[in-house]
Amino acid sequence: MEDLSTRSDAFRARATTTLWRGLSRWRLRSLWWLARLVGPAVMQFSRREREVTLINLAQAYPELDQKQRHQLARNSLVHSSASMLELGFAWMGPTERIDASIIAVKGRELLDEARQQGRGVIVLAPHFGNWEILNFWLSSHFPFTAMYEPPKIRALDAVTRHGRERQGASLVPTNPRGVASLLKALKRSEAIGILPDQEPDWGSGVFAPFFYRDAYTATLLPKLVARTEARVVTGVALREPGRGFVIHFMAADERVYSNDETTSATGVNACVECAIALDPAQYQWEYKRYRKTHEEQISHPDFKRYRLY
C-alpha cells in the first residue's frame, strides 16, 4: 500500500512539475486569461473554496450585500487561481523575465534604513497577491531567510525548494531549530520573512482580533523583536493583471513592538488588514483563518505543551 502511495505521489509530482515548466513559458497576460477561466469554475464547482471564501468575506465586509460578496468572492478565486498558475513563472521562469515583471517597488527605504541602522528586518508577508514574486525580489536584494514547510506531495519538495532558493534565499524548518536560524539572521542585520496569517499550532499563538473576530495568531514576532530589536514591515506583491507586479513595503502597526503577546498579535493582524485594503480581491480568502476557537482551547488544558518557541 505504501509503495502504491509513493508511486502515486511520484506521478503527481512529475505531472505537476511538467505543468509548471510549461506554464513558465507563458506570458503573464496569457496566465491571467487562463485564471479568468479557472476562477469561475472553482467558484461554481468547488463547494469548499466557495463557502469558506463567502463566510470569510461576510465576516470582513458585513456592509456588502450578497451580490457584492459573490462578485468579490469570484474575483478573489480568479486571483488565487492566478497565483497557482504563476508558480511555474516564479520558480522556473528566466530571472530576467521575472525582474521585468516587477513594475515598481514602493517603500524600499524602510528596509534600507533599518539595515543602515544595523537592525534586522522582519517582513510580514500575508497570502496576498503573488508572495512568491515577493520572495524572489527579497532574496535577490538582501540576505533573506524564511521558514519552510515541505509540500504535502513530498516528491515536489526538491522543485519547491529550488524555486524559492534559486536567488539565494535560505529556507529553515518550522521548528525550534528554524527559529534559532531566524534569530541569527536578524542579529546579522539581515531580512527574514514570516507568514502572519497562517494559523499556528496550539501553544504558539494567542487569540487577537482580525476583521472584528478573534483569530488564533502566532506569537513568534514579539519574541524575535524583543531579542533582536529588529524593525517590522509588511510586504506584498500586488498583481497588475496581465502586466506584472508592484511590490509594496509598509511600516508595521506600532503595536507589533509590544512585549504583550496579545497586543503584538493585534498589531500583526492590523498589518494584514492594511495590506488587504490595497485590493481585497487579491487576498486568499479561502483559507480557514478562524478554524481554532476559544471553546476548543478550553478543551485543551495542556495546550501549551505544543509550543514550538
Image: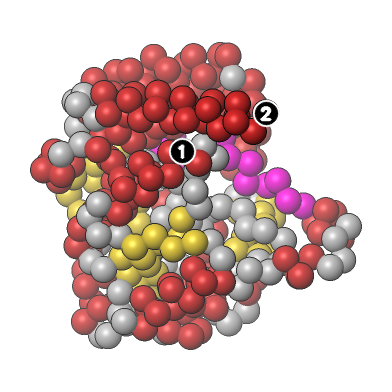
Depicted 245 relative to depicted 212: above or below: above
| Residue 27 percent location from the top left of the image | 19, 26
Which residue sits at x=51%, y=58%?
A: 196
- Residue 35 part of the magenta segment: no
Q: How is the image coloured?
A: secondary structure
Depicted 32 relative to depicted 300: above or below: above
Instruction: Give the quarter of the figure containing the C terminus.
Output: bottom right
Which residue sits at x=85%, y=60%?
A: 300
| Residue 234 percent location from the top left of the image | 39, 60
Residue 1: assigned label: 2
Residue 155: assigned label: 1
**Residue type, mark 2 in image:** Met
Residue 203: assigned label: none
- Residue 286 part of the magenta segment: yes
Which residue sits at x=68%, y=47%?
A: 290
| Residue 82 percent location from the top left of the image | 36, 29
Numbered disc 1: secondary structure: helix
Numbered disc 2: secondary structure: loop
**Residue type, mark 1 in image:** Ala
Q: Is 137 left or right of 301, judged from the image as shown?
A: left
